[in-house]
Amino acid sequence: MLGRAEDAFRIVGLAAGSRADVLAAQIRALRPAVAAVANIADLALLDLPAGTRGLAGDDALVEIATHPDVDLVLVATGGIVGLRPVLAALAAGKVVATANKETLVAAGHLVMPLARGLASSVAQRDPGDPYASPLAWLRPIDSEHSAIWQCLVGERPDSIARLVLTASGGPFLDAPSDLSSVTVAAALRHPTWTMGDKITIDSATLANKGLEVIEARWLYDVDDDAIDVVIHPQSVVHSAVVFRDGSLKAQLGTPDMRLPIQYALTHPDRRPSPSAAVDLVAAGRLDFRAPDLARFPALEIARGAGRIGSRASAALIAADDVAVARFLAGTIDFTGIPRLLESAVRRFGEGADQTPDLETLSALDGEVRATYTNDTTWSVA
Ligand code: MG
């Protein structure tokens, strides 16, 4: 937990997709005014105390995100479920801190104008106000993007020359050379971070890093060709910025998500946290190398989708959800994941409209999921 968070924050609303048991425990501890689950049948499992109103269904997240008592919305949903609530929150002038990549990958063209609009209205009054930056309104929790944000505080956007996203390389960085027979258990054994299954598999394929390149392009308004991906197995340098004078700034920390989560909540302040600082002497050495694009083709497939546009990126993330679920279920092998992604980007991602509206994005998401959930092309015998 945060250092003395109870002094600084009051939880107004809590929501969960399916883990009603975990949510019920949080409700008992934090007594929010509203609580929401995806399915109305789960509401009874929450055992709501007096003073907490229960909500369910599609509109519940929007209602919580725009609640009059809410100042900051923390988003940790998967897929594009969080997109409509994020747009509603920003439209209502709330700060959004997001751990969800899909919001920007699929819909950066819808989300960023709202964050920029909020920032520019502050900048007109006081250009030196911390809220004059879009990053104060749309705050990244992803460790790489938090690192870049921390490097950019106090810097002008036109000073940026390049961004450097670091990647641990995942469990198959050096072996085996043939990835078609790796097991689910081996793929889930991430060397440095403890995360959910979906993102752990995305780290093993490097698809995650491709999604992060797209996320970074939107957040920092930088082109794809100005972003480098560097493998850094120790996960101590979380990412870096190269400035036009040749100076490189990096943010270092122990691999502990509590630090980027806390920074997104307390920015521009820094407060004591439970995360210990990196001990440089104990770390001893830090290694860096270029990614192996032949063994990990998902990185370039994902970056390519980002270069095509938001339609292709949306097709990519829907396909990746299906591909990872199918790998975990044993119906495709590890190398089937990038092949499925490539197929989805080609089949659904190309097209003139690369700035789809919310309805078009939802329809595309459903179509890609339905297609690849049932397609047996990559099935293992
Ligand atoms: Mg990350």
Image (cartoon, grey):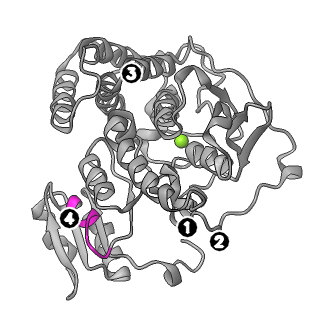
Above-or-below relation of 155 to 2 = above
Of callouts 2 and 1, the N-terminal one:
1
Give the labeled residue for mark 3.
337
Give the labeled residue for mark 2.
271
Above-or-below relation of 151 to 201 = below
Q: x, y percentage for residue 106?
A: 33, 34
Mark 4 vs mark 3, foreground winner is 4
- Callout 1 environment at 10 Å: few (<14), some (14 to 19), or many (20+)? some
Q: For ligand 1, which image quadrant applies?
A: top right
Q: x, y percentage for residue 308?
A: 38, 17
Residue 49 in view of the camera: yes
The quadrant of the image that shows the C terminus is top left
Tell me the distance, in whole angstroms, between the alpha carbons under discs 2 and 1: 7 Å
Q: In this view, does 170 lie to the left or right of 72?
A: right
Residue occupying the point 34% across, 35% down: 109
Of callouts 4 and 1, the N-terminal one:
4
Q: In this view, does 254 lie to the left or right of 12?
A: right
- Secondary element at image label 3: helix
- Secondary element at image label 1: helix
Residue 238, quarter of the rendered image? top right
Residue occupying the point 44% across, 50% down: 99
Mark 3 residue CB less than 8 A from any atom of ligand 1:
no
Of callouts 2 and 4, the N-terminal one:
4
Mark 2 vs mark 3, foreground winner is 2
Mark 2 in CB contact with mark 1 (< 8 angstroms)? yes
Tell me the distance, in whole angstroms, between the alpha carbons under discs 2 and 3: 41 Å
Q: x, y percentage for residue 39?
A: 14, 58
Which numbered disc covers residue 63? 4
Residue occupying the point 37% across, 14% down: 339
Residue 324, quarter of the rendered image? top left
